[in-house]
Image (cartoon, rainbow, N blue to C red):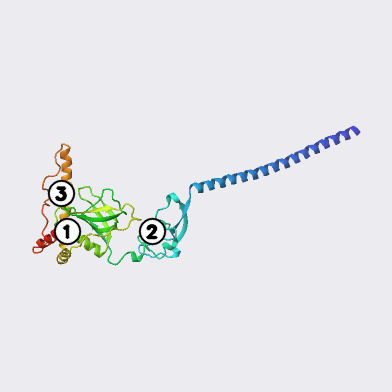
Amino acid sequence: MILRSRRYRVILGFTLGFLLCLVVSGLGFYWYLTNEGMLSREKLESVRTEAVNEYIENNPTGLIYILASDKKAGEVLRDTDFIAAEIGIDYMPSDAISDISHALGKVVRCDVKANTCITSSLIYSEDEYPDDMRLTEYTVINLPEKLEPGQFIDIRIMFPNGLDYIVLSKKRVIDLAHTGDGNIGKVWLYSVEEEILRMSSAIVDASIVQGAFLYAVPYVAPDIQEAAYKTYPVNSEVYDLIAENPNIVTKAITELESRNRELFENIINNMQQNSGKKAIFFENSIETGHSFQLTENNTEDTDNDLDGRL
């Protein structure tokens, strides 16, 4: 009995010791896992923070304002129409509004949807567009091949004796259409009444003087370059003729378009002949050798006046 009791105590002690070791080992292992998890989370958070900071440093953002709701053309913008947002600098429009004061009270130029970024080209001040401003279309201006909408141009007139005048200065090209059939192309501009009359006078002058033509010259840096001084001396006699017969401008446009077409055909024919090929266009396909008659009584006086000016 004594031996059995002693053996029992030994087994019990061994069992209790084993269980105690298990408990201590379990607690130690749990403590290790807990602290290791905390260290891993801290390390992961640190890595994530570093990655975010590095991304922000390499991809800076800028503040823009977007529309909170759809807007119709002509609506005036209020302070409740804007929502601040951030966008990558690389994707930010160059004319994006970053100061809300620059957009308050401005007028929306066209219909726009909600969440559209507000840019200076999308809005305008009411005083920027006078009552007599119109969208004018011209087909008689020699346009540069690389001209694009949004660029600023001077419209000039050159006479065959070398005299060159600025008719309109720093006009923004609203739209543009280069044609492939030999025409110079079309250009759309915003013009006030005085500019429309100046262009009408220049068109008539260019049609009266054989060899004169209108052409456009783009600005290189319109943001910092001032508008050129307009040097074209408006012909008062032409103004009088326009007042007497408005169809004169239409006839002058037709005359200049015909000259431009003839010039194009001559260039193409010369290119063909220089390369040993036959001419594409027949000679005298368009009769433009003489200026049209403005009026029976006033043409000679107008020509004399132009000769005296040149």
Disc assigned to residue 262: 3
Observer able to see residue 3 = yes
Nearer to us in this view, 48 or 71: 48
The amino acid pointed to by label 3 is Glu
Q: Residue at x 14, y 60 (%)?
A: 308
Observer able to see residue 1 = no
N-terminal-most mark, 1 or 2: 2
Q: Residue at x 57, y 44 (%)?
A: 47
What residue is shown with label 1? 205
Q: Residues within 10 Å of mark 1 (few under 14, many from 20)?
A: many
Q: Residue furthest top?
A: 3
Nearer to us in this view, 76 or 57: 57
Question: Where 167 falls versus 49 (above or below)?
Answer: below
Residue 229 x, y percent position in the rendering: 27, 59
The amino acid pointed to by label 1 is Asp
User: Is label 1 in a helix, a strand or a loop?
Assistant: helix
Q: Residue furthest right?
A: 2
Cα–Cα gap, marks 3 and 1: 19 Å
What residue is shown with label 2? 120
Q: Residues within 10 Å of mark 3 (few under 14, many from 20)?
A: many
Residue 288 x, y percent position in the rendering: 12, 52
User: Is label 2 in a helix, a strand or a loop?
Assistant: helix
Q: Quadrant of residue 13?
A: top right
**Quadrant of the image containing the C terminus:** bottom left
Disc assigned to residue 292: none
